[in-house]
Amino acid sequence: MTRQAMSPSGEPGDVVDPAGGASPSPPGHAGDSRDRLPAWARLADAIVILSIALAVIVLFFGGFRLSVLGLRVSVKSWWRVAAWAGGIALLRYAAVRRDPLPSRVMSGWRALRRSEAIWAVAPAFVVTRAAVLLVGLMAVYTIGYGPAGPPFRVSDSEVGNLLARFDTGWYLGIASRGYSAGSGGQQNIAFFPLYPFLMSFVGRLFGGHLIAAGFVISLAAFYGALVYVYLLGRLLSGREGPAVASVALLASYPFAIYFGLVYTESLFLLCAAGAIYHLIRGQPGPSAAWGLMAGLTRPNGFLLAVSLAVVVAARAWPASVPGRRWLLAPGADMEHAGRVGLRWADVAAVAAPIAGVVLYSAYVYRLTGDPLAWMSAQGAWNRQYGGVASLVSGPAQRLANHGLEGTVAAWPFDTLNAIAVAFAIALLWPVTRRYGLAFGLFVVANLLPALLVGGVVAVGRYTSVLFPLFLWLGERMPPRHAPYWFAIFGMGQGLAACLFFTWRQLF
């Protein structure tokens, strides 16, 4: 088993690479500045790879036209895309002849096959995703729907209709027909564009079956997110055991059912964990890419910038100042990345999530005349600011009037969501103390706004993406206690699957 290299000061040095062994220092480290390809060359290689993939898609599945935030994109000829890829590749190789793209691709493929992280997360992913769908289908057959039946269907078969639940209908409508400017009531502009855009694009590979495309996107994003959570666990703890435990806890969490559905939870978790991981590693380029996508995925995605700003502050913070540990955990210290201070690339990474919401707001302005119409549209789902006091006074009044049993009986779904909130609040301080303010603020930014504008309604779903909670629990949980945690989480996820798939209002 590989271990994290330690610096003379006792803090982690080089980070263990997913493929095993110590990874080379990230950008900015003095030891690798002459050996790395220029950023523009790496970007050119990425464009070439994406262009080749796009040319293959067009060749086998035909051309397409898409509307992206009001801009029409038309790709009809595969050979033109391939010609562009060839031209970019020739220019790149003429300027920088070392590390040609084919050798880089093969090297990356070999590293992927040896990747410790890729294989470490597979058992938790396969078991939990399969179990959720099986339990959900059996719940439909045995428990059935309420008297009113399902609000909408996409298939006569219960298997084909299994994923058509709640918000899936909104993403399906956006992916198939685009956004529309309504004049009141629930409007689809409340749902951010990246996920339905990916559904529309990938759906062409599935013969127009958009729900199947969304399912594949969610599964792929969740697998990638688990890999990043594993890598963060290795980085922060320096050990494999806690990282594996964190992944298993996250995958078995009761509200983790949404990671295998046509919902945005998987994509947001991937973007958030990827952005934070790469910025900690001193890689602002990938961090900015993930951050931009986070800002285009969910209404609160732009708040990821807060955690990223703290990571950047930790990079610029003088090493001799003890307060730096409160910004970022010693396990994620910047020793391995070199203390390069504040760079414009770091600022761009912090701004990327905000740029995402700005782009969508500009499109909404073009559509409705109000750039924040997506925000006001939330009110149609009874999401109104209730103040901090209401978070305590409401539940307290219910308990005083109905007692514990009466409150649970009258508001069972609120009770389940409230338990998830209590779990997150209980771990907030331990997470902040262990991993630093960057991780603590991530929890707050994804929990507090939802509570302030909607109370505990559906907030359990928002707690599912709070990966720092599971990093801490996986590291601190004694191995002998693990079976009990997994049993409790597994039973909760089974209950959540039964409720969700039979159209009970777990949301």
Image: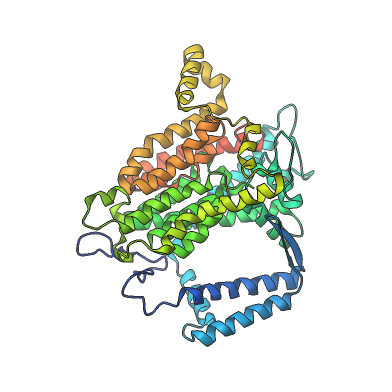
Does 243 appear above or below 299?
below
Q: Is residue 98 left or right of residue 261?
A: left
Which residue is at a point 69% across and 44% down the rendered structure image? 369
**Residue projecting furthest to the top:** 401
Tell me residue 59's x, y (percent): 74, 73
Which residue is at a point 52% across and 21% down the rendered structure image? 408
Tell me residue 211's x, y (percent): 70, 50
**Residue projecting furthest to the right:** 156
Tell me residue 407's x, y (percent): 52, 19
In this orientation, does residue 486 appear?
no
Does 264 appear above or below 506?
below
Does 153 appear above or below 98?
above
Q: Is residue 464 left or right of residue 192?
A: left
Task: Give the quadrant of the N terminus.
Answer: bottom left
Which residue is at a point 77% across and 45% down the rendered structure image? 154
User: Which of the 4 image quarters holds residue 2?
Assistant: bottom left
Q: Is residue 249 left or right of residue 207?
A: left
- Asked whether 375 or 393 is in front, the reply is 375
In this orientation, does residue 453 appear?
yes
Task: Give the quadrant of the C terminus.
Answer: top right
- Asked whether 317 or 503 is in front, the reply is 317
Does 404 appear above or below 284?
above
